[in-house]
Structures are given as C-alpha cells and as structure tokens.
Image (tube, rainbow, N blue to C red):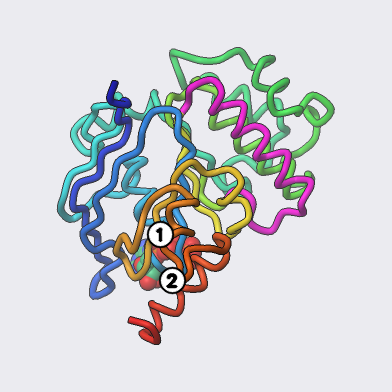
Amino acid sequence: MKNEQVIEVNDVTKSYGKVQAVQGISLSVEKGEVYGVIGPKGAGKSTLLEMLMGVRKADSGSISVLGLDVDQEEETLKHKIGIQLQATSLFDRVKVKEALKQFHSYYNKTRSLDEIIGLCSLQPYLNKYVRKLSGGLQQRTALAIALVNDPEVIFLDEPTAGLEPQARAELWDIVQLMKEEGKTILISTHDMEEVQTHCDRVAVVVEGKLFASGTPDELIAQLPGGDGTMEDVYLQMAVFQNGVSA
Ligand SMILES: Nc1ncnc2c1ncn2[C@@H]1O[C@H](COP(=O)(O)OP(=O)(O)OP(=O)(O)O)[C@@H](O)[C@H]1O
C-alpha cells in the first residue's frame, strides 16, 4: 500500500528582492514521518518551512498540506497544523497556564489542556511567567501551545537551538510521542546527531535548492566510501557549497 502523502511541495520558489531564498524545491512528506530540514545558515530552511505553514506566500510553485492548498485554503489549514512559535515573542509576559488557555480558546477542535500539560511535563511550571523559565522550558511551553488544536502536522523551526543536552532530550521525547500518535513532524535543526537519531527522512537544503534527500542511512551511503555520520554528510555538503568538490 502506498503511504499517505501529507505534504507535497512542487517546484516552489521565493525571493526577497534580489535574494533567491528558495529556488525550485520539490519534496513530499508522508504521514507519521519526522522529517528534518537541514542546511547551512541562510540556505532557505525557515523560508521553506514558513511557506509550508502558510505564513509566507511562495512566488511560484504549489504546496499542499493535508490535501489543502496552503494559499487557497489557509484558514482551514490553520486549524489542522501546529506551529512552535518562538517563546520570546507572543506570550512571554504571561504565565504558562495563561498562555496555554489563551491559545486553547482560539480553536474549535482542541486537545485537553491537562493532557497536553502532562505530555509536556509542565505541571510544576503552570504559574510561572514564561519569560522567567529556562530556554528548555520555554521551548516545551511553545511546543505545548503548538499542540492545543491537536494538529495533524507539527512544524518546529530549530526548537533545540541553544538548549543543553537534557532539555534537547526532553523535547525529542515529546516529538517521539507525537510520532507514535501518527502525527507528521517537520523540524529544522543544525544538530546532526539529532537528525541521525530522530529523523526518518531529511531534506538537505543548500543555497535555496534541494541538494539531497533521503533517510540518514541513505544520505550517509552517498558519502565517499559510503560510511560515516550525518555530521560528515553536512560537512561534505558545506564543502560542495564552497565549490571545493563540485
Ligand atoms: N524577510 C526577509 N527579507 C529579506 N531577506 C530575507 C528575509 N528572510 C530571509 N531572508 C534571506 O533569505 C535567505 C534564506 O533565509 P532563511 O532564513 O530562510 O534561511 P535559513 O536556512 O533558515 O537560515 P538559518 O539557518 O540562519 O535560520 C537568506 O539569504 C536571508 O538573508
């Protein structure tokens, strides 16, 4: 049986003035996958994710998420996806419980707050101000907020950046639980160890283009000698980008 495609991206481009941030990317993501997006700084990862979330409009090409066109059916889609917002922006002046309740009230279809609090182990922090929490707890709060509408697809843009190992592990534990529930997760990260351990498939974006994609094992098999780690894949790709081995 063919796996269900949850995200289909077809030849998408996006420029900011003269900067061609995304230049003709096509990819597809299956239901239940943890799909990593990796690449050097400025490669176009955030721009790509933002277009998939429907918060940034592509210049050309098409994107369908859960069978919905992200441009035409943005309103419907908003209720079916979860976006991990940066904790510093929207809700850092409120307490964890208040932030959760506020976002919970925006949606018709929701997941029980108690359940989300349990999933994200936030019980001890409910009456603390978000901005006073550690980076890891802020990210967990942001992830909890992304789960309030019980989304089928979850977008995480560098959720573990700057976190210590324990906080990273806790965040990935929640991602794993979501995967086990059949959710589809798209995640950008600069941490190749995380990619190798947790991602089912990976898109390598370099200078706005899809340089390679596949499972971590498939990408590693493409290395000279066919052996190594995702760190080696990343280094190889950065070398390619500098034209050394092109
Ligand atoms: N709002 C914007 N206006 C102008 N240029 C932008 C804007 N957002 C991104 N860019 C440019 O587009 C290119 C791709 O940026 P993007 O943030 O998508 O890359 P990224 O791979 O997510 O980078 P990072 O790893 O640093 O987050 C970069 O050259 C960046 O400077």
Q: Eyeballing the image, is 225 above or below 118?
A: below
Quadrant containing the N terminus is top left
Look at 53% across and 63% down and name the residue there: 227
CB atoms of marks 2 and 1 within 8 Å = yes
| Residue that label 1 marks | 204
Q: Is residue 2 above or below residue 232?
A: above
Gap between marks 2 and 1 measured at Cα: 8 Å
Q: Residues within 10 Å of mark 2 (few under 14, many from 20)?
A: many
Q: How many marks?
A: 2
Residue under numbered circle 2:
237
Q: Position of residue 55 (x, y in %)?
A: 35, 44
The foreground one among 77 and 36 is 36
Sequence order check, earlier mark of 2 and 1: 1
Nearest the eye: 196 or 78: 196
On screen, residue 92 above or below 19: above
Mark 2, secondary structure of its residue: helix
Boundaries of the magenta span: 159-183
Amino acid type at circle 1 is Val
Q: Residues within 10 Å of mark 1 (few under 14, many from 20)?
A: many
Q: Amino acid at mark 2?
A: Met
